[in-house]
Image: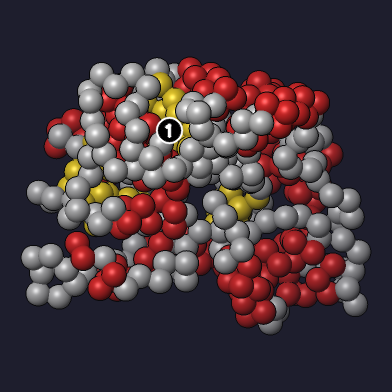
Amino acid sequence: MGKLAITGGEPVRKTAFTPWPVLAEEERRNLEDAFTSLKWGGQPFPGKYADSFAKKFAAFQGAKYGQCVSTGTVAIEACLKAIQIRPGDEVIVPAYTWEGTVGPVLLLNAVPVFVDIDPETYCLDAKLIEAAITPKTKAILPVHLGMRFADMDEILRIAKKHNLKVIEDCAHAHGAQWNGKGAGSMGDLGAFSFQSSKLITSGEGGAVISNTLECMELVQSYINAGRASLTDQFHHRIIGYNHRLSELQAAVLEPQLDRLPAQAAVRAKNVKHFESRLQTTPGIRLLKPDQRITRLAPYGYFFKYFEKEAKDIPRAAFVAALQLEGIPCDGLFYEPVYKSSLFPLKPEDFPALSWGREKPIDLRTKYSCPESERAAYHEAVWFPHFLFLGTTADADSIADAILKVLASGEELRGLDHKAIRNQRLGRADRES
């Protein structure tokens, strides 16, 4: 029997962290009101709770217009329709992200163009974008990942220079600001998710924000079965789907938005304390601060793990040992999308991958993004935000477990293959 829980010892932590999501009386009251109103769906459009929240959320993020939708993936799809992406158009996307960022591009018969990430942020590397632009490029789709932003200054400069649209994937960025501007408000549109793990959640759900009325009108028509938008100033008529958010889901959102600033402050304080414990720990490298991030959204916290500096403990064994010490965490949180088992792409299913080409593009073999692959398979260790929603003692328990595992690396030899297998199997059940 060893010292580590994975080898039979006592775990650092035997109690659960703060449950997520938080349930308060305001949600109960709103749910009862929505239930007794008998207007459970998203029609008549817009629903009372969905409309109220969308307006308040857009303003909170610094945008003029907001619209609730059924999921975060639908939010991206609706954004693509709003900028009038056509079959065969190309959209630049980061390789290291959730598969739902890229799927909507293909489902609209457009072509995703993968670009590697900046190793300092794990977000789309703006320095590599211009080399990926072709005459078919119509948009850039940066993802703000894990308390960091893609370099919006440079991305907006490139977009203006090449007459491209920008859609921000803000699934991690509720409340975040870049140079005082809210995530999602800087590009043409911003897409958010309210899936169960997010900083604001309705179980499933999402939202689109924009400062451009024409874009918002197209979003509303697309998610409301093609009906005319609420303002209908541009008179667009498109075929749409029913992707409205139900009132039973929307009812729980506004109270969470009200609590978000206070919760973010707690998370930020605990993250700062946690980092102070690990600042000089061999094998671990913390993210560099970026002064352009003027308000943090502590969603997915990650650090970089270096096996060689950590006494040759494989990352998978390190993560598995931490989990059994009572610390929820993940190594294979994201994969490069083109390598992911959740991206079973057959080129013949997407006609635009064949147009004008001798052979169809095979996205699974065409790309090699070394920084994305290094992050996915070697470096990144991710921690969910609710770990930092409690007390300083909770943050200490995470640090204690990490230091314990690193100090007892000799107990972990030979555990990596099983841990890797378990991580891969678990990935199919996790949503972004």
Residue at (76, 55) in percent of width and height: 327
Q: Residues within 10 Å of mark 1 (few under 14, many from 20)?
A: many
Residue 29 seen anywhere in this rendered image of the structure: yes
Residue placed furthest toward the front = 38
Residue at (81, 57) in percent of width and height: 326
State the SS at label 1.
strand
In screen coordinates, is 342 left or right of 160? right
In screen coordinates, is 149 left or right of 152? right
**In the foreground, 50 or 258:** 50
- Counting every numbered tag in the picture gives 1
Residue at (34, 62) in percent of width and height: 369
Please determine whether, in this image, residue 257 is positioned above or below residue 240. Answer: above
Which quarter of the figure is the N terminus placed in?
Answer: bottom right
**In the foreground, 235 or 425:** 235
Q: Residue 36 at x, y = what percent?
A: 73, 28
**In the foreground, 65 or 305:** 65
Q: Give the amino acid at mark 1.
A: Val
Would you identify the image quadrant in which residue 182 lies?
top left
In screen coordinates, is 122 left or right of 227? right
Q: Residue 374 at x, y = what percent?
A: 45, 63
Would you identify the image quadrant in which residue 8 lies?
bottom right
Residue behind mark 1: 208
Q: Residue 258 at x, y = what percent?
A: 66, 21
Would you identify the image quadrant in which residue 84 lies?
top left
Please determine whether, in this image, residue 289 is positioned above or below residue 257. Answer: below
In screen coordinates, is 138 left or right of 70? left
Residue at (25, 73) in percent of width and height: 348
Residue 291 seen anywhere in this rendered image of the structure: no
